[in-house]
Image (spheres, grey):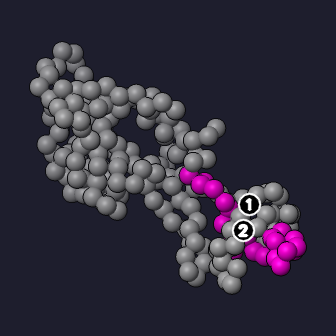
Amino acid sequence: MSLVLEYIPADREIATENKSVGWFCLRTHPKHERLAAAHLRKMDQVEVFLPRIRFKRATRQALVWVTEALFPGYLFARFDWDLRLRQVHHARGVRDIVHFGENWPVISENTIHELREAVGTTELHTLSEELCPGDAVHFADGSLRGLRAIVSRVLPGQKRVEVLMELLGRQTGIELTVGSLIKEGHARAELFRR
């Protein structure tokens, strides 16, 4: 996916109809992406796109499902730059509209379309942590927390796997629940590899 930007100079004249309508990147206050999106959605002639991901994160107790913005601190809004700039800029939760000096980048429709295809119509993409033999994993809890192992086999229907880990100089097989393991690597990076 390539990000295509067109810059709008702050003092430019509108030459053609709807030239000022486009997708802009908005910076939000920390952890306020959903609040900003909710307030922007109440405005007339403002379309909002907040891509989010849902994934499992290890806590001290166990793995829990977490939902975060795909781009933390940012969301996208489509609006008429000439008519709605001030209103959008001062919406609750919005910190700023991304700009570079006097240039305001407009994000192409194709880029937004590709993001929507990747995330889905609900603006929420759930990252599954399906394990396969050969996957490198880390223990998420218990006395083995943080140690690395390799999945040797997936046990059908039981949500359990067998992992091999080096213990006292030899490889040992251990059988445990899938929820007590975290797949190695960044699952977020896999979202756009298709």
Q: Residue 146, how many percent across, how many down?
A: 65, 73
Residue located at (48% from left, 30% from top): 2
Q: Is residue 132 magenta?
A: no
- The x and y percentages for residue 150 are 79, 63
Task: Residue at 64% x, 38% y: name it.
Answer: 194
Disc 2 is placed on an element classified as: strand
Residue 131, percent from left and from top: 75, 60
Along the line of sight, which residue is nearer the eye, 52 or 38? 52
Residue 173 in sight here: no
Provide the major secondary structure of the magenta segment.
strand
Query: Which residue is drawn at the image coordinates 32% and 53% (left, top)?
Result: 37
Rendered location of residue 167, percent (x, y) = 82, 76
Residue 6 appearing in the image:
yes
**Mark 2, residue position:** 148
Viewer-side residue, 115 vs 149: 149
Q: Earlier in the sequence, mark 1 or mark 2?
A: 1
Q: How many marks?
A: 2
Q: Residue at x 53, y 38 (%)?
A: 117
Discs 1, 2 touching: Cβ within 8 Å: yes
In magenta, the rendered stretch is 164-188
Name the kind of residue labelled 1 in the image. Ala
- In the displayed structure, would residue 14 be above or below residue 109? above
Tag 2: Cα neighbours inside 10 Å, few (<14), some, or many (≥20)? Answer: some
Identify the residue position indicated by label 1 in the image.
136
Q: Amino acid at mark 2?
A: Arg
